[in-house]
Amino acid sequence: MHGRKAYELVKEFADGEKGHLKIFNLLRQSSIHAECFFLFIVVWDVIIQNELFERVIEECNEHHNALQSLIRKMQEEGLEVQTARNADHYGALIHHLSLIRNKRCLMAYVYNRAEIIRELAWKVGLLHELPGEIQEKFSDSEEQYFKDHSKSLKSYMSQLSLDVNVDMVPPKDPYIKVRVLEDLGSGIILSDKSANFARHSMHFLKRTDAEQYIARGLMEELTG
């Protein structure tokens, strides 16, 4: 109560490895609207949520109902809600502030996950694919967000005739040695050749060709 679950939700994200997502467990579709002192606050439209996320939403509902109950009680007693200073006023204030805190925590959780997804779209590049172990951590809405952002990025690069996924700092050597971690098949067209990427095979590739596969965990760069 009073923001504890929302704190746990944000802490769950903050405790995770930087740049990585934890799984978003599939539950139900839901939305929540909270009214605080006649201010209509949209907390969030939650399409898919994990268990802790849902518990925060339920807590928001509890605060909302308690807040409205206290406001109705004060109105029935003929008190001015915004100027009265009794126990009910301060009780309503606590529920109001708890709603605001929960709203901020929910938005921080969703926003920071979206930031990681956006970074992944830039790292993967034009292939618009992610390893299964990453995709399974997305909610349906997050998966669609990744696809839409990747599509917009591809359209932008096409208009500029420029690949903005490459490193800002030019590498010392345009070619790198890589090992294939998953069987990718044969006849894959690269910028300067076609190749057969069998599992555990090693190749010298242009860095710009290899980066997308490295980002997806399909290849690793060999150094030394």
Image (spheres, rainbow, N blue to C red):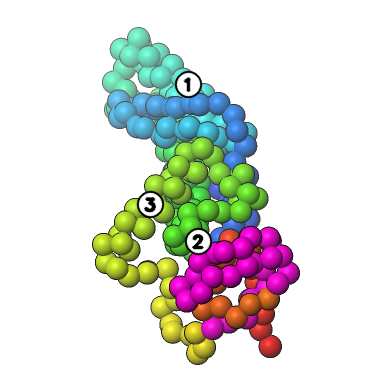
Judge left or right: residue 28 versus residue 219: left
Query: Looking at the rendered structure, which numbered label has been put on residue 151?
Result: 3
Of residues 56 and 172, which is closer to you in this image? 172
* Location of residue 37 by image quarter: top left
Q: Is residue 81 magenta?
A: no
- Residue pushed farthest top? 76
Image quarter for residue 34?
top left
Closer to the N terminus: mark 2 or mark 1?
1
How many other residues sit within 10 Å of disc 2, few (<14), some (14-19) or many (≥20)?
many
Of the two numbered discs 3 and 2 on the same chain, state the one appearing first in sequence.
2
For label 2, the residue is 124
Give the percent coordinates (x, y) of residue 140: 51, 37
Q: The residue under label 1 is which amino acid type?
A: Ala
The region drawn magenta spans: 175-201
Instruction: Identify residue for label 1.
Output: 66
Marks 2 and 1 sit apart, C-alpha to C-alpha, by 47 Å
What residue is rendered at 52% in x and 30% in y?
A: 57
Residue 173 x %, y %: 52, 88
The secondary element bearing badge 2 is classed as helix
Does residue 118 appear left or right of residue 186 in this picture?
Answer: left
